Amino acid sequence: MRLTRSRFRLAVSLFATATVAATAALAGTAPAQAAAGCRVTYAVTSQWPGGFGASVDLTNLGDPLTSWRLTWSFAAGQVIDQLWNGTVTQATGRVTVTNAGWNGNLGSGASTQFGFGASWNNSSNPVPVDFALNGVPCTGRTTSPTAPPTTAPPTTTTPPTTAPPTTVPPTTAPPASGALDQTSTVGRVKAVGTSAQYTWPGIYFEGRFRGTGVGIVLNDSQNDYVVQIDGATVATLVTPGRTTYWVRNLTNAEHTVRLVKRTESPWAAGEFGGLVAASGGAILTKPAPRSRQIEFIGDSWTAGYGNMSTTRDCNSNGGVTRNSNADVTFGALTAQSLNADYQLTAWSGLGMVRNYNGGGTDNFRTYYETDLQALWNSTTWQKPSTWKPQLVVVGLGINDFSTALNPGERWATIDQLAADYRTAYLAFIDKLRSRYGADTFIVLTYPDLSPTTALASSVQQIVQTRVSRGDTRIRSLYYDDNALGLDKLGCDWHPSRRDDQLLAGALTRFVNTLPLTW
């Protein structure tokens, strides 16, 4: 199977961090006698061949601001591709970031954060120089005005003129309760005020309402979404930003609403702020969770990488992200056919021990237990007691074995790689057993990777080893390309939507042969 470098999404350990700060008077952006000062913490959070991610923490040490502009210079040709929580312009190495609509107010001592993805020269990625806030160099101290102000400085921060991102926009009446009180989800989410943040693909929220319409409160400029009413898709939202999306002109009755994150965003969190009823309607008690639960663990196949495309080269039809839909992956379709709640714990490009083409030092196991993947504030996901999947389907190994070993990698031969893979996989299964217990069925899947048989033989050996140790609730499932008739017309030779349907059929038939008690 041919894979291209464009699919590679890899976060690595934090390796560059710098803190700088500013002192002087803010020319043209604050009163002439205002005190000024700022501090910037810049961190490279991830890096891979050709690209990197970074976070920036800006603290205002001077008088309150109602808008801000942070500038700096890249010294090694870095170029920002996308930025969240602000607006960016770049001319050669000079970068200017201005505030978003909701984070322009920056009181004394207040901080704001933003992040970005960028390209680099694969040789040097130094920390930027000459950070400045509204034209003032950052050094970490506050400079008092040369003459005292005629009025006392404010004792509190300036109240924001617009709501921060964790609240509902001021033009919309707030929901009666928080997003997680109104909707059901089994996804890995982090509560932030009344909102929920998330990064993993396929996260979904399900709610109920009465009336002729419903508003869905979102703050996300990175991801795409599916909106469904009463089981039917009514909209696809492409990077909606900060908005309340309305579905109107429905029959005045009780309805269900489902919001699904279609895309991957390991370095950028989406935010769901809850539901708003149309005039005369009401948000109803959230649906009860399903008794059946499945966790799908994997890579780009599980995440739905480019599965909506009908051509393998996606450069001319919107790119990988616009052509990805986690809601129609084989995992989502299998769970829906079995009436089960599910998680898609998947990340394109990552393997069990080796990532695509040998890139990076971290692998899937590094991030498996995180709530927000590689985001700067990600922590270990606190698994709720209600999440007890009776079935876990694992598909990891394509990235380990699909490309030839490169000079300098720690494995000299495929046999060495396979041995390391088996050891790590067995330890990962031990973790799953500790996490979910002995009764959970674990199914290890693998596709055709001809001409190598290293993946197939390794998975089969892993199952045999577990069974020899007394684990009777583990199986393997081979996806035979030819027998299933896969066309792999998704981006970069990935499964297409049709392929996902075929894979879901094969997996569902297999699951129905297992002695599951759910």
Image: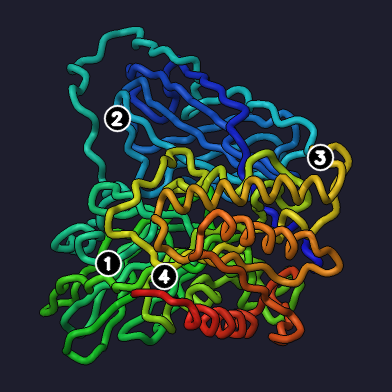
Mark 4, residue position: 260
* Residue 438 tag number: none
Of mark 2 and mark 1, the one earlier in the sequence is 2
Amino acid type at image mark 4: Val
Mark 2, residue position: 107
Residue at 47% across / 57% down in the picture?
Answer: 200
Mark 1, residue position: 184
Q: Nearer the viewer, mark 1 or mark 4?
A: 1
Within the image, what quadrant is residue 245 found in? bottom left
Amino acid type at image mark 2: Gly
Q: Sort mark 3 into few (<14), some (14-19) or many (20+) by Cα contacts within 10 Å.
A: few
Frontmost residue, 281 versus 267: 267
The vertical placement of 70 against 177, above or below, is: above
Amino acid type at image mark 3: Glu
| Mark 4 residue element | strand
Q: CA distance from mark 4 to mark 2?
A: 36 Å
**Residue 172 at least partly seen:** yes
Of mark 1 and mark 4, the one earlier in the sequence is 1
Residue at 62% across / 28% down in the picture?
Answer: 15
| Mark 3 residue element | loop
